[in-house]
């Protein structure tokens, strides 16, 4: 009996020491198939859309899906675009984003939790205009394989809301003129390195 226990213990130890967790995988954003956008209500009647032309993002995973993944994103605030040059220049000014002093917008996830086959809840820290706040995002994720490169790819539709006043952006502007709540909408395609 002792011999069986010793052999079993040795076999278990060998199995544990031979197990190597999968190395973390890094996914990079395909900027040609991605857009980081937002909408804000104008005069309580219509929606104005905008986006950042220059941004970068990566996701680091350690499992078979995106559970517990870490997403990091940066955007050049100077690249803001609402299809109106005068408005874009105004948004870059000290009245709003103040890009001379706060040129980057950053996000880093704290949790990335799977809630169904293709849906995740992401909580992370968004920093813009020198202020960091925790925001919640809903993520729809689809995965596949690029037929040309045969590499894994993942597409994300990311939605959420925040208040511009929480970040001190355009605080002098009444919310009846420009809504305080900003809706975020990002569509991003990532490929595994």
Image (cartoon, rainbow, N blue to C red):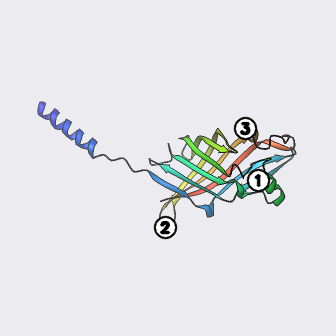
| Left-right relation of 91 to 193 | right
Image coordinates for residue 36, horizontal then vertical, percent: 67, 54
Q: Residue beneath label 3, please?
A: 166
At horizontal 47% and vertical 65% (from top left) the residue drawn is 150
At horizontal 51% and vertical 69% (from top left) the residue drawn is 148
Circle 3/circle 2 CB separation < 8 Å:
no
Which label was assigned to residue 92?
1
- Quarter of the image where one finds residue 160: top right
Q: Is residue 68 above or below residue 144?
A: above
Q: Earlier in the sequence, mark 3 or mark 1?
A: 1
**Foreground: disc 3 or disc 1:** 1
At horizontal 11% and vertical 34% (from top left) the residue drawn is 3
Q: Earlier in the sequence, mark 2 or mark 1?
A: 1
- The secondary structure type at the circle numbered 2 is loop
Query: Distance from label 3 to label 1 (Cα)?
Result: 18 Å
Residue at the limit of the structure toward the bottom, as seen here = 148
At horizontal 78% and vertical 51% (from top left) the residue drawn is 93
- Front-most of 138 and 129? 129
| Left-right relation of 71 to 126 | left
Residue at the limit of the structure toward the front, as seen here = 101
Image coordinates for residue 119, horizontal then vertical, percent: 58, 45
- The secondary structure type at the circle numbered 3 is helix
- Front-most of 60 and 33? 60
Q: Residue beneath label 2, please?
A: 149
Residue 85 visible in the shown view: yes
Q: Quick one: label 2, few (<14), some, or many (20+) residues within 10 Å?
A: few
Which label was assigned to residue 36?
none
Q: Is residue 156 above or below residue 125?
A: below
């Amino acid at each position: 009996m002792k011999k069986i226990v010793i052999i079993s213990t040795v076999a278990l130890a060998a199995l544990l020491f031979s197990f190597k967790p999968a190395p973390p995988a890094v996914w990079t954003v395909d900027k040609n198939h991605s857009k980081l956008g937002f909408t804000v209500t104008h005069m309580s009647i219509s929606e104005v859309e905008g986006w950042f032309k220059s941004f970068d993002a990566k996701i680091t995973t350690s499992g078979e899906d995106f559970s517990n993944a870490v997403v990091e994103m940066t955007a050049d605030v100077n690249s803001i675009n609402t299809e109106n040059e005068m408005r874009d220049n105004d948004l870059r000014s000290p009245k709003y984003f103040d890009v001379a002093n706060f040129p980057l917008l950053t996000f880093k996830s704290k949790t990335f939790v799977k809630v169904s086959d293709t849906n995740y809840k992401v909580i992370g820290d968004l920093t813009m205009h020198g202020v960091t706040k925790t925001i919640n995002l809903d993520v729809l994720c689809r995965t596949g394989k690029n037929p040309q490169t045969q590499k894994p790819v993942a597409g994300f539709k990311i939605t959420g809301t925040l208040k511009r006043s929480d970040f001190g952006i355009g605080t002098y502007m009444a919310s009846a003129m420009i809504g305080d709540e900003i809706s975020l909408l990002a569509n991003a395609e990532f490929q595994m390195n």
